[in-house]
């Protein structure tokens, strides 16, 4: 089974046709990079994968759950599918460590000591061990985004969606975040990444999907994509 499968999916906002007959498969462990002009539907597309946007027509299967079926429990999908946003969306009144420990505690009922141990491991992985007791406002954008990635990993997801994770960052912070994303890919976690970072796409992506006006115009393996004129 694929991790994600879109079959003839349409999405309308009122009369506006935002996604047009999307057919797309993402296999387990694959890194798919989604590119395209602003307003082409990239954000809409990845937001349908964890149910932040519902679809209007067609079928969408994520981790064996059918999102087109109204009876499907979205909480089950969100447990396995993490999301990293452009603007981090950290809890501002909680420390970095608490940000990471919150969802595993509440959703997975994880043992407190085990939760903390894993959170500290993840902080080390993203290079922020010294910031465990800091609040988000004390961090740079790049540091916040690395915390957001650690927070997402704490749920031990099968898949993480990234919506322009480096677009809000100062240029000198982008590489640290991309390095952490590369580590996530190396862990075998399925990733769908909306980004303009073509170096990352080329190095880490397995496939490039090009969206324009709500339609997929290209879906190539990375090598083929970068060979095209
Ligand atoms: P991208 O991520 O490629 O910039 P989006 O998915 O954000 O594109 O948006 C695709 C199109 O859908 C845009 O024209 C945008 O204005 C429109 N759109 C996005 N969200 C909504 C919404 N909640 N209501 C109405 N139109 C929307
Ligand atoms: P981004 O491209 O980073 O997602 P946008 O400015 O396109 O940011 O969208 C920000 C929010 O506004 C999203 O929640 C989106 O769904 C909503 N939105 C975008 N375009 C429209 C629109 N034309 N009408 C209503 N809501 C919209």
Image (tube, rainbow, N blue to C red):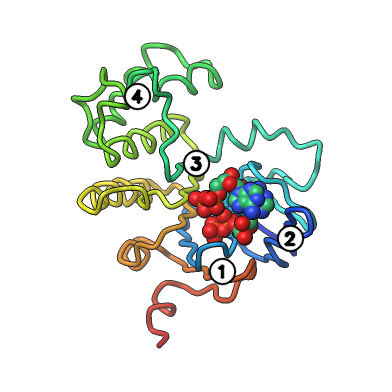
Which residue was labeled with disc 2? 16
Mark 1 beta carbon near ligand 1 (under 8 Å) = yes
Q: Nearer the viewer, mark 2 or mark 1?
A: 2
- Between the residue at mark 3 and the residue at mark 2, the CA separation in whole angstroms equals 25 Å
Whether residue 118 sits left or right of residue 69 in the image: it is: left
Residue on which the image places disc 1? 211
Q: Is residue 187 visible?
A: yes
Ligand 1 falls in quadrant: bottom right
Mark 3 or mark 1, which is nearer to you? 1
Q: CA distance from mark 2 to mark 4?
A: 44 Å
> The N terminus is located in which quarter?
bottom right
Q: Is mark 2 within 8 Å of ligand 1?
A: yes
Q: Is residue 211 left or right of residue 135?
A: right
Q: Residue at x 31, y 31 (%)?
A: 122
Is disc 4 surrounded by few (<14), some (14 to 19) or many (20+) residues within 10 Å?
some
Q: Among all residues in the image, which is located at the extreme bottom? A: 229
Name which of mark 4 and mark 1 comes first in the sequence.
Answer: 4
Using the rendered view, name the quadrant where residue 130 is placed. Answer: top left
Residue named by callout 4: 118
Residue 126, image x, y percentages = 27, 37
């Amino acid at each position: 089974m694929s991790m994600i499968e879109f079959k003839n999916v349409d999405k309308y906002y009122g009369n506006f046709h935002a996604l047009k007959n999307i057919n797309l498969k993402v296999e387990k462990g694959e890194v798919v990079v989604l590119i395209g002009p602003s307003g082409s539907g990239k954000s809409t597309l990845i937001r349908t994968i964890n149910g932040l946007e519902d679809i209007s027509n067609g079928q969408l299967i994520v981790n064996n759950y059918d999102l087109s079926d109204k009876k499907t429990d979205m909480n089950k999908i969100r447990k396995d599918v993490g999301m990293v946003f452009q603007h981090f969306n950290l809890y501002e009144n909680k420390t970095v460590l608490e940000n990471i420990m919150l969802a595993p505690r509440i959703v997975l009922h994880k043992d407190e000591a085990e939760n903390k141990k894993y959170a500290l491991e993840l902080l080390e992985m993203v290079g922020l061990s010294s910031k465990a007791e800091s609040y988000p406002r004390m961090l740079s954008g790049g540091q916040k985004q690395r915390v957001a990635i650690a927070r997402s990993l704490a749920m031990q997801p099968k898949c993480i969606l990234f919506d322009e994770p480096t677009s809000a960052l100062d240029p000198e912070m982008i590489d640290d975040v991309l390095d952490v994303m590369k580590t996530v890919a190396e862990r075998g976690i399925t990733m769908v990444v909306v980004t303009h970072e073509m170096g990352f796409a080329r190095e880490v992506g397995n496939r490039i999907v090009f969206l324009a006006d709500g339609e997929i115009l290209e879906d190539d393996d990375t090598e083929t994509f970068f060979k095209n004129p």
